[in-house]
Image: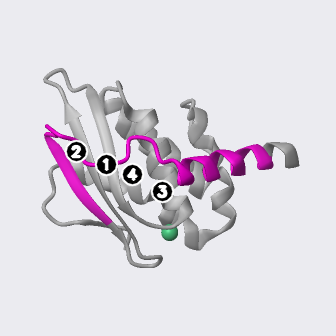
C-alpha cells in the first residue's frame, strides 16, 4: 500500500509543480471564480462547451495550496472532451470518494490519487474547490463559488 501512496503523492506533487491547462482560455464561453476561505485557495475556471454539450477546452488559473492546484489540474485533464452530463457525474463520484468513500461506480482514473485527502477533513475543500467552481461555471453563476 505504501508504494501506492508514494505514487499518488508523486502525481500530486507533479501536478502542483506543473499544472496542466493553466492560464486563461481565449474564447471561453463559461467561466467562474472559486474561493476556499478556510485555506485561501482561489481559482478561476474557463470552459469552452460546444453546441452538443461537449467540453472542448478547459483551463484554470489562480493561486492555492498544493492540493487545490493539483486537483484543479487533474480535473481539467479529466474533463476535456467529456459531455457536461458526464462531468457532473464525475463531480458526484469524486465528492463521494472524498466523503463517504463509496457509492461511486464511475472510473475516476487519475482523480483517485486525491483519495488520501479524506483522512484530512480540512483539506477536502481544497480538493473539491475546482469542482464547485466547475458547477458555477456550467450554471453561469455570477457569485464566486465558495466552499463555505
Ligand atoms: Zn487549500
* Dot 3 or dot 2, earlier in sequence: 3
* Dot 2 or dot 1, earlier in sequence: 1
Viewer-nearest residue: 36 or 27: 27
The residue positioned farthest toward the top in the image shown? 52
Disc 3 and disc 2: Cα gap in Å? 20 Å
Is residue 71 inside the magenta stretch? no
Disc 4 and disc 1: Cα gap in Å? 17 Å
Please name the residue that numbered disc 1 is placed on.
23
* Dot 4 or dot 2, earlier in sequence: 4
Indicate the position of residue 21 as horizontal and vertical percent values: 38, 41
Viewer-nearest residue: 35 or 84: 35
Please name the residue that numbered disc 3 is placed on.
69
* Dot 3 or dot 1, earlier in sequence: 1
Q: Which residues are magenta?
A: 5-34
Label 4 residue SS:
helix
Residue at 45%, 67% in the rendered image: 64
Disc 3 and disc 4: Cα gap in Å? 12 Å
Q: Quadrant of residue 80?
A: top left
Query: Can I make out residue 101 in this image?
Result: no
Closer to us: mark 4 or mark 1?
1
Please name the residue that numbered disc 4 is placed on.
131
Label 2 residue SS:
helix
Label 1 residue SS:
loop
Viewer-nearest residue: 86 or 40: 40
- In the displayed structure image, the side of residue 7 where residue 38 appears, left or right: left
* Dot 4 or dot 1, earlier in sequence: 1
Closer to us: mark 3 or mark 4?
3
Amino acid at each position: 500500500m505504501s508504494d501506492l501512496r508514494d505514487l499518488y503523492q508523486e502525481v500530486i506533487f507533479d501536478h502542483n509543480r506543473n499544472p496542466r491547462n493553466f492560464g486563461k482560455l481565449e474564447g471561453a464561453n463559461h467561466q467562474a471564480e472559486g474561493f476556499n476561505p478556510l485555506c485561501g485557495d482561489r481559482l478561476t475556471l474557463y470552459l469552452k462547451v460546444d453546441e452538443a454539450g461537449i467540453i472542448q477546452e478547459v483551463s484554470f488559473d489562480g493561486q492555492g495550496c498544493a492540493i487545490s492546484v493539483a486537483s484543479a489540474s487533474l480535473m481539467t485533464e479529466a474533463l476535456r472532451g467529456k459531455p457536461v452530463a458526464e462531468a457532473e457525474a464525475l463531480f458526484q463520484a469524486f465528492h463521494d470518494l472524498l466523503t463517504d468513500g463509496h457509492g461511486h461506480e464511475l472510473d475516476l482514473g487519475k482523480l483517485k490519487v486525491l483519495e488520501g485527502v479524506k483522512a484530512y477533513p480540512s483539506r477536502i475543500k481544497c480538493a473539491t474547490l475546482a469542482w464547485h467552481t466547475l458547477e458555477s461555471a456550467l450554471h453561469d453563476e455570477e457569485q464566486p463559488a465558495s466552499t463555505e
